Image (spheres, rainbow, N blue to C red):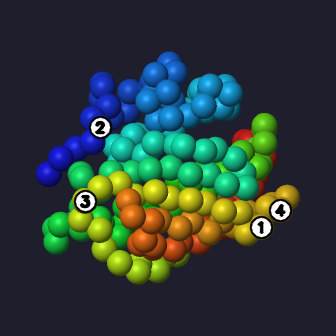
Amino acid sequence: MMDNFTPPGSPGEARKDHGAELTAAGVPPEMHEWLGEHGVGRLTLKMGIRFLEMGADRMVATMPVEGNEQVAGILHGGAHLVLAETLGSFAAGIHAGPGRHALGIEISATHHRGVASGTVTGTATALHLGRTLTTHEVVMTDDDGRRLSTARITNLLRDSGT
């Protein structure tokens, strides 16, 4: 089994400088201050997720199939959900703004077709951007633009520290 990323140091070791991590993940420089304290997260890096667009209304990222397959050789269904939750939660966090954060409270997905190679693109589109809740639809497609899965994620927006 291939591992897309093995972080340095022990599992509990705090990492302080995330600039290289953010750049490698495709995060635009104007978003570095927002994510600088925490980075994009180890799972995002391990799955090979790379951001192409970042906004509350629309967020797009890619993820390789290789290294994220199930035993049958196709992209694992859980990998679809990791990509969907990453996109929906980051978009909700942007909408929440400074001093607030997003907490995923519901996610579901329908898998339409399998994919055994290439790159998956996830596109999150806001369905609702409220004061306390956000909901995004996330569509995953293959290299030919065919729909692989459709997910929906709802996030609760809270003030930081609560």
Residue underneath mark 1 = 128
Hey, what amino acid is under mark 4?
A: Gly
**Label 4 crowd (10 A; few <14 / some 14-19 / many >=20):** few
**Residues at marks 4 and 1, CA–CA distance in whole angstroms:** 6 Å
Q: Tell me which numbered mark, 1 or 3, is placed earlier along the sequence.
A: 3
Mark identifier at residue 91: none
Asked whether residue 92 is in view, the answer is no
Q: Where 47 sits versus 28, above or below?
A: below
Q: Which mark is residue 117?
A: 3
| Crowding near the residue tagged with mark 1, few <14, some 14–19, many ≥20 C-alpha atoms within 10 Å | some
Residue at image location 50% in from the left, 59% down from the top: 122
Residue 90: x, y in percent? 62, 48
Q: Nearer the viewer, mark 3 or mark 4?
A: 3
Circles 4 and 1 in contact, beta carbons < 8 Å: yes
| Gap in angstroms between the C-alphas marked 3 and 4 | 37 Å
Residue at 78% in and 42% down: 97
Report if the CB atoms under discs 3 and 4 are less than 8 Å apart. no
Task: Please tell me which of labels 2 and 3 falls first in the chain.
Answer: 2
Residue at label 2? Answer: 5
Please tell me whether mark 3 sits on a helix, a strand or a loop.
loop
Q: Is residue 90 left or right of residue 111?
A: right
The amino acid at mark 3 is: Ser
Task: First in sequence, mark 1 or 2: give its number.
Answer: 2
What residue is disc 4 on? 130
Q: Is residue 115 left or right of residue 111?
A: left
